[in-house]
Amino acid sequence: MVDVEKIRADFPILEEKVYGKLLVYLDNGATAQRPLPVVDRMTEYYLKYNSNVHRGVHYLSNKCTDANEEARREVQHFIHAASEKEVIFTRGTTEAINLVAYAFGEAFVGEGDEILVTEMEHHANIVPWQMLCERKKAVLKVVPFDDKGELQLDIYEKLLTERVKLVGVAYVSNVLGTVNPVREMIARAHAVGAKVLVDAAQAIAHLPVDVQELDCDFLAFSGHKVYGPTGVGVLYGKEKLLEQMPPWQGGGEMIREVRFEKTTYNELPFKFEAGTPDFIGIVGLGEALKYIGKIGVAEAGRYEEELLHYAQEQMRQIPRLRIFGEARQKASVISFQIDGIHHFDLGTLLDQMGIAVRTGQLCAEPVMQHYGMTGMVRASLAMYNTKAEIDKLCEGLRKVEKMLNV
Ligand code: PMP
């Protein structure tokens, strides 16, 4: 079992007060908090070892370089990649998807080809594909979800033809919390020769991820959603595919030899890592994965699932409250609305009580359109949240109802 009190002690922000009230942080889907070991390790590197990676021959540079490559192995281990060459550091999920949309698109997508995404994707897994389709005169197709928030797999089957070059799908929806059956979807896509990119931004801290078991071609996630720092993320890609893709950004580090006549490129993973990376952020990300690895993602996920069920049960007691997303497999996210109360008012009044939730379109306008909503309120959980905090949220919601007299 997860020792929540022990975990909470590693996150000093959870003892902060806002407007004189103890913080209840339920916006983990937007960004999780960082534990002391991550901040301490980064501070240590800033204060003692700060130096650019891969370029120096001196002690500090080697120290940072080694720490970065150790972090890469930590990621490899965490997602069960076959080789560290398959782990590319990016600025986050968004940059990872843009990298694939560009480089995979250049190598493999042409006029009339199709890219398939789902109706529940975050904008980061929609817009880069639209840009690619515009560039290549390819066509973007969409797999819809039903009102429970589950993908309509029969339509997915129908849309999967040999024209489809790539499927982009969220492992966990950032609005509906749906855990999509990505393993089966990947197998189906491979049967028609399509590749699959899994957006694991909302999965990485809540479900064990094994890229070899999933057999995904690409997988993306952000450090800041898995208790690591902002500004750093990961693109996993199968080595064979990455080898066939041209570089995305040009600059230092990604080259082997630069000549005005012809430049040659570095080997993997550096071919896709132009310029100075956030090398201390990368050290922090490695530490974050070590941290959650010790607790166990599966254990954390089981605890969060219990909390999610408790929260949904409690929230369903509020008569005018509607939860969006009732999928059988759901993780860590509850989006909702109270009839007659604007989502922004709800979020603002909860904030006054020290409760941090997200409101608005949640970077998923198509999901809003599906339900005919202008916005929602989202509570998203992490392994340090408690039932007592859920009780405070529900108490807060009831207070808001009373205040606004609905
Ligand atoms: N995909 C999903 C499912 C997300 O939830 C998010 C972040 N909200 C992103 C992509 C984008 O992540 P980032 O902003 O860290 O690049």
Image: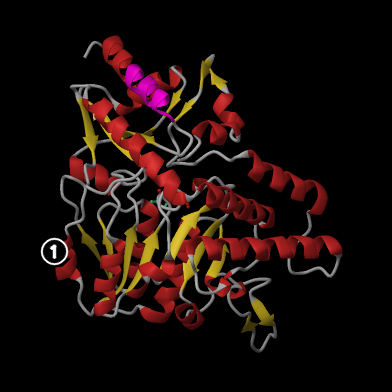
Residue at the image point whose x is 35% and y is 78% from the top: 109
Residue 249 lies, in percent from the top left, at 57, 69
Query: What range of the chain is rendered magenta?
Result: 386-396
Quadrant, the C terminus:
top left
Q: Quadrant of residue 33?
A: top right
**Which color scheme is applied?**
secondary structure
Residue 387 within the magenta-colored segment of the rendering: yes
Asked whether, in this view, residue 267 is left or right of residue 297, the answer is right
Residue 99 lies, in percent from the top left, at 48, 67
Asked whether, in this view, residue 99 is left or right of residue 310, the answer is right
Crowding near pointer 1: few (<14 within 10 Å), some, many (20+)? Answer: few
Instruction: Return the residue found at the far front.
Output: 1
The kind of secondary structure the magenta stretch mainly shows is helix
Q: Which residue is mark 1?
A: 154
- In this view, 393 is above or below 192: above
Asked whether, in this view, residue 49 is left or right of residue 234, the answer is right
- In this view, 35 is above or below 248: above
Residue at the image point whose x is 47% and y is 40% from the top: 2
Residue 252 lies, in percent from the top left, at 68, 71
